[in-house]
Image: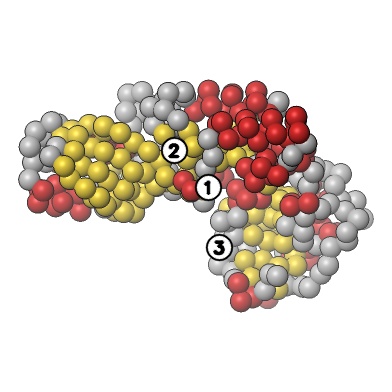
Amino acid sequence: MLNNETGWIVKEEAESDSKYGCFPHERTIEECLNNGLVIIDKPAGPTSHQVAAWIRDVLGAKKVGHAGTLDPQVTGVLPSLINNATKITPALLTEGKEYVFIMMLHSDVSEKLIKNTVSDFIGTIVQMPPVKSAVKRRLRQRNIYSLDILEISGRYVLFKADVQAGTYIRTLCVDLGKRMEVKAHMHALRRTRAGPFYENQAVTLHDLKDAFVAWKEDGDESKLREIIKPVEFGVKHMRTILVKDSTVSALCHGAPLHIGGISKLSKGIEVDDQIVIKSLKGELIGIGTACMESEDIKVQKKGIVATLNRLVMKEDLYPRMWK
């Protein structure tokens, strides 16, 4: 149950009519496949686009996207979004990442120098994207939230790093070497977290195929339901506003969210924050930009609270209730 104790502000108590929509966990397996995501443990070898294409073919989906490209030889967490769920991809691309990686030094360096150099790279750094990258090559700032040395073995250094989206670990290794006045390169890399998705939640491509075959051939959808997460799972980390049934259709037809349509909202919303707007059943309506902060929404009686940038819900799921 949502309440203030879990970080919610109650604007107006309201109930949702069972005739419209449904709770995400009550969707049919077909609806899950059209509005779901799967957290894949990407193997070394294929590109991220090849993995997405393979998922698309296995599931018979129209489209599959991924949130955060991994190079072919890099393994780890690759959130993959199916059909309608691809609409939330931009919201996930900006989320932080966690990596475990090995840096190889080309010359002998003391452990003291390594540790002292690493400490200098925690915080805001400046990087030049590598030649083979999808972005324009120009200096840009990135935040290194943590950079922990797990082990040093000769010229090999094992790290765990928590970084801002868009940080190049390959470049980080080269820059660490330069600071120590030796050459260095990234020897191996694995992504252990992408935004709210963790390594222990990831499944292999074979797991996904086996679960899909079990459903298609034997009618057993239990494993597939475990693997395919509802689209709402992908935005659970974002601040949220729950709206009344009477407001849902208006939002789906392009109207901004007004204070009168709100039932509950997260604490801590600031102006210009990217926020999630859901029905009282927890269905994702869309992602928008906040025009007010939580404390103002709490006390104001009228005004526009948010505008939707990404509409996810179908227009006809809830009836039209506005004049």
Which numbered marker is on residue 201?
1
User: Quarter-wise, where is residue 295 in the image?
Assistant: bottom right
- Choose between 244 and 57: the one closer to the eye: 57
Q: Image point 71% across, 26% down: which residue?
A: 60
* N-term mark: 2 or 1: 2
Q: Amino acid at mark 3?
A: Glu
Q: Residue 198's x, y, as percent? A: 48, 48
Q: Image point 21% across, 48% down: which residue?
A: 151
Q: Secondary structure at mark 2?
A: strand
Q: Image point 85% across, 47% down: which residue?
A: 317
Name the residue that disc number 2 marks.
76
* N-term mark: 3 or 2: 2
Q: Image point 53% across, 27% down: which residue?
A: 51
- Choose between 153 and 314: the one closer to the eye: 153
* Mark pair 2, 1: CA separation: 11 Å
Name the residue that disc number 3 marks.
270
